[in-house]
Image (cartoon, helix red, strand yellow):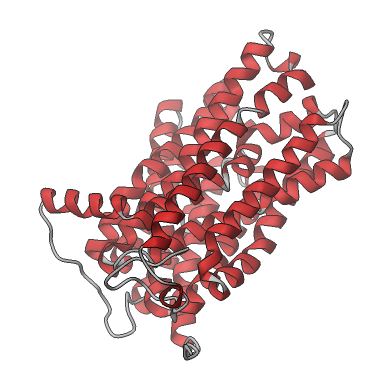
Amino acid sequence: MTEPDPAPTRRAWLVWGVGLSVYVLAVFHRSSLAVAGLAASDRFDISASQLATFAMLQLLVYAGMQIPVGLLVDRLGSRTVLTGGTIVLSLAQAGFALASSYPAALVARVFVGMGDAMTFICVLRLVSSWFPGRRVPLVSQLTGNIGQLGAVGAAVPMTWALGHLGWTTAYLTAAAIGPVLLVVLRFLLHDHPERKHVRGTALSRRALAASLRASWFQPGTRLGFWVHFTTPFSATMLALLWGYPFFVKGEGLSPTTAGSLLTLIVVANITGGPIMGWAAGRHPWHRSTTALSIVAAIVAMWTVVLAWPGQAPVWLLALLALVTGFGGPASMIGFDVGRTSNPATRLASASGIINQGGFVAALLVVLVVGWVLDWRTPGGATDYTPSAFRWAMSVQYVAWGVGALQIWRYRRRVRRGTGRDRVEQGSTMVDRPMAA
């Protein structure tokens, strides 16, 4: 029988809290433009498509930075990379506050995306270093869920600040939070219970490429990638761009009701995290089964909504929002599979590969939905019809199909490489991969 893991120490919770605070700040900066759309349009004299470029470019930079950041964390440790990320975020937000032209604002948002990318993987690495193996899935879920409070914090405070303080003062005030957290980080955050810094071995370009290949060709990393690819993109697509138009134009809801449904996605994301974390820690052998079950539930809800004759009732759309929102915490299962499938020396680079999955899927689906809507409604956004949205939202089935097939494929490979008893120990891989 496996002995129970020791309880985490107070110091472990303190270190996690400091790292989590930096991640919350990153999400705050990432989301701070969401409530400033009209103000940004006026300040930079830009169109709606130019405004949308801010969000798309920032996400592209975030996704593209995941592997480089993972390699940096494996080499330099979380403490150093989090320090750099906090500095980049603060300077970028200050630059955005002072930008007076659209190109300058775009450059600032690129660096916001870079700084944002340097936070989440660092905190996951800290969780793996400071917490017992069976606690890691739950604390990782809490990291992702609590981090989303940064988006909530960006809504009301930034709306008030933009209205009362003006653009420059509001964003400079937000940027000033970073240096305060930086001081706390430098005093309290260590990479490991026994060491302030954990440095990896300096590697040549060839060795780095070999390490990255080893991470990618590890079946557990690929399984984690496809779990992260398949589970969250529908919720991201709705929350990022197409949810509001779909509910208003496609389903005939009022703007207030549409906004409430989008809020339900966040509620599901936050409440689902502890459940997914508990399930992954308690039943690690069935992690991929849990992910496939969530995907099946999301597909089923979309099928009912899209097949409903006429406009779907509000209660059904609320169920859609809630079930789709569970895809976010389900995606965190991918990181836990990667953790138990890779040695600690390349844990962050594997997490970076996995973290790309959901963002790649979301960007592809967002773009293709837009293309289909343009095809079905050449007149533009004012002419969007329920029929056009049914066509457009159906493109998700392709991504779900590809992702679910790959999850099934790679979970069989991972399970063949280990035994169930080893999986249920819950620790990071030492000599061979663990199943899911």
Query: Relative to residue 422, is residue 317 depicted above or below?
Result: above
> Which percent across, then down, holds residue 32?
57, 46
Query: Relative to residue 208, is residue 360 depicted above or below?
Result: above
Q: Is residue 105 visible?
A: yes
**Residue situated in front as seen by the camera: 96 or 331:** 331
**Residue at (74, 18) in percent of width and height:** 384
**Residue situated in front as seen by the camera: 136 or 216:** 216
> Which percent across, then down, holds residue 51?
55, 28
The image quadrant that residue 415 belongs to is bottom left
Residue placed furthest toward the top? 378
**Residue situated in front as seen by the camera: 223 or 199:** 223
Query: Relative to residue 149, is residue 128 depicted above or below?
Result: below
**Residue at (39, 39) in percent of width and height:** 61
Q: Is residue 1 left or right of residue 91?
A: right
Q: Is residue 119 visible?
A: no
> Which percent across, then down, holds residue 95?
41, 42
Query: Relative to residue 120, is residue 110 depicted above or below?
Result: above
